[in-house]
Image (cartoon, rainbow, N blue to C red):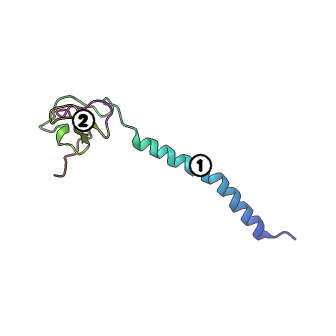
Amino acid sequence: MRDSSNDLSRRNFLSGVVVLPALAGLVLTQTATAEAKGSQAQFKYQKTPSNGKKCSQCKFFVKGSSATANGSCTLVAGTISPNGWCIAYAKQSS
Ligand code: SF4
């Protein structure tokens, strides 16, 4: 007579062996995706303000060496002008 609890345990173990590496791969993929920036073209970045809105006022802007120096953006790749703008603009809270 077969012990069904052993079959169930082995089945659970085997499914875990298959699922865990798949989950690890998913987590790595999501981490890489979260760290990847979009291109300036994707975000329709421009080097000039739009309706008075500009990168230096955006919460995603990372300042350069001075207030007027180019900086970077946590969302958009490449050098970002403090006077630039893109479709992801979000005003800083303070
Ligand atoms: S999200 Fe857009 S508007 Fe904001 S800093 Fe980045 S490029 Fe500028």
Asked whether, in this view, residue 54 is left or right of residue 20, the answer is: left
Extreme-right residue of the structure: 1
Who is closer to the viewer here, 3 or 63?
A: 63
What x and y, as percent, mark residue 30? Answer: 47, 46
Q: Quadrant of the N terminus?
A: bottom right
The reply to whether the magenta stretch includes residue 83 is yes
Residue 85 percent across, percent down from the top left: 21, 35
Looking at the picture, which amino acid does disc 1 mark?
A: Ala
Q: CA distance from mark 2 to mark 1?
A: 36 Å
Name the residue that disc number 2 marks: 86
Q: Residues within 10 Å of mark 1 (few under 14, many from 20)?
A: few
Earlier along the polypeptide chain: callout 2 or callout 1?
1
Please provide the residue range marked out in magenta.
Answer: 76-86
Q: Which mark is residue 22?
A: 1
Q: Find out if the beta carbon at label 2 lies less than 8 Å from the nearest ligand 1 atom.
A: yes
**Residue pictured at 78% horizontal, 69% vertical:** 4
- The residue shown at (75%, 70%) is 5
Residue 6 higher or lower than 43, as above or below: below
Q: Secondary structure at mark 2?
A: loop
| Ligand 1 falls in quadrant | top left
